[in-house]
Amino acid sequence: MKITRLTLVVLMLLTLSACEQENSGWYGIVERERHSLSAPVSELITDVLVREGDQVRAGQVLLRLDDSSVQARITQREAELAELHAVREELTQGPRGEAIARAESAVQGAQADVLDAEQRLQRAQQLVRSGAGTQAEADQTLSVRDQAVARVEQARQQLAELRNGTRPEQLLQIDARIAAAAARLALEQKALQDLSLVSAHDAVVDSLPWQLGDRVAQGAPLISLLIDQQAYVRVYVPADARDRLTPGTQLMVQPDSDIPAFPANIRYIRAQPAFTPFYALNERDRARLMYLTELSLPEQQSGLPTGMTVEVRLP
């Protein structure tokens, strides 16, 4: 009879121990999504508009970098674009009347040179026939006449080009150059905007490692923000409970305060265990593996402070 009672006591203790182990929880921390802003270029910090712990709104400017270099490049790009627009306007308007009149005068002058060269050629040929001149002099005079005729044709072509105006292909070329210049200007304007770091979310400034006047390297983290309304619990669950947990499973969360426990759903469980690869462990050590798990907090509990310790357990 005594042995039976002792056996019952042992069984009860084992049952209670198993229940305690079954209902024991895991400790986690309240976290928030982080948003980091880094330096787009290597420049000096010229303005810091927030401090650590400040509440900021989406679209609020937090920090500015020196923009003197970008402003100079924007001025240069604007001048290039203005020059190209002026060239296109000139091509659209066509040649001025004075230019056409000048080309007409050039044609008339070239024609007069041809008449003079023709007369010189005729006299040279007469001298050759009379024996008073040489054939070499006549050939030289003929060459001068041919050159004068060529200059007349050249002047006429230039006049025709002015009268016909700008070719459509020239307008297409200048339009392409204008588009390229406008794109370069847009890139510089975007670079100017990037020098003002703006919050994309309603958030709290968590970290601000740089100060006014510091020169930062490109890609250096300048501001770290904790996004509001994105609170969640990060907890590591043991391998022996992993098979009972899936995304959407409801667990109980007990904050380390007077707040009563509340349910929260698992939103993510990492597939691989943390700390040590499972294939490097024996069967006993595998039971100690921990899996990173994240729980979405209900809206009414979204105000829990970041870093608060909570206990997570099965319902």
Image (cartoon, rainbow, N blue to C red):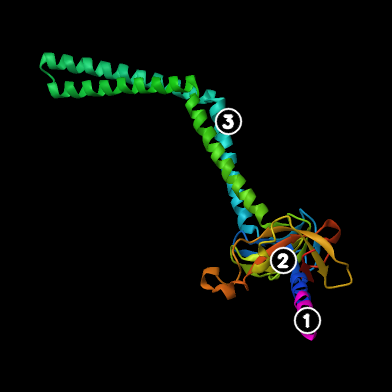
The image position of residue 202, as x and y in percent, is 79, 57
Of residues 272 and 181, the one nearer the viewer is: 272
Q: Is residue 171 above or below residue 61?
A: above
Q: Which residue is mark 2?
A: 234
Q: Is residue 142 above or below residue 270?
A: above
Of residues 289 and 22, the one nearer the viewer is: 22
Based on the displayed image, in which of its 4 quarters is residue 261 positioned? bottom right
Check disc 2 and report its element: helix, strand or loop. strand
What residue is rendered at 62% in x and 63% in y?
43
Which image quadrant: the C terminus?
Answer: bottom right
The image position of residue 289, as x and y in percent, is 62, 71
- The stretch of residues the image draws in magenta is 1-15
Q: Residues within 10 Å of mark 1 (few under 14, many from 20)?
A: few
Q: Which residue is mark 1?
A: 4
Q: Residue furthest left?
A: 131
Q: Earlier in the sequence, mark 2 or mark 1?
A: 1
Based on the displayed image, in which of its 4 quarters is residue 198 positioned? bottom right
Q: Residue furthest front?
A: 1
Amino acid carrying label 3: it is Glu
Of residues 314 and 126, the one nearer the viewer is: 314
Q: Residues within 10 Å of mark 3 (few under 14, many from 20)?
A: few
The image position of residue 248, as x and y in percent, is 73, 55
The image position of residue 107, as x and y in percent, is 40, 20
Amino acid carrying label 2: it is Arg
Check disc 1 and report its element: helix, strand or loop. helix
Of residues 280 and 307, the one nearer the viewer is: 280
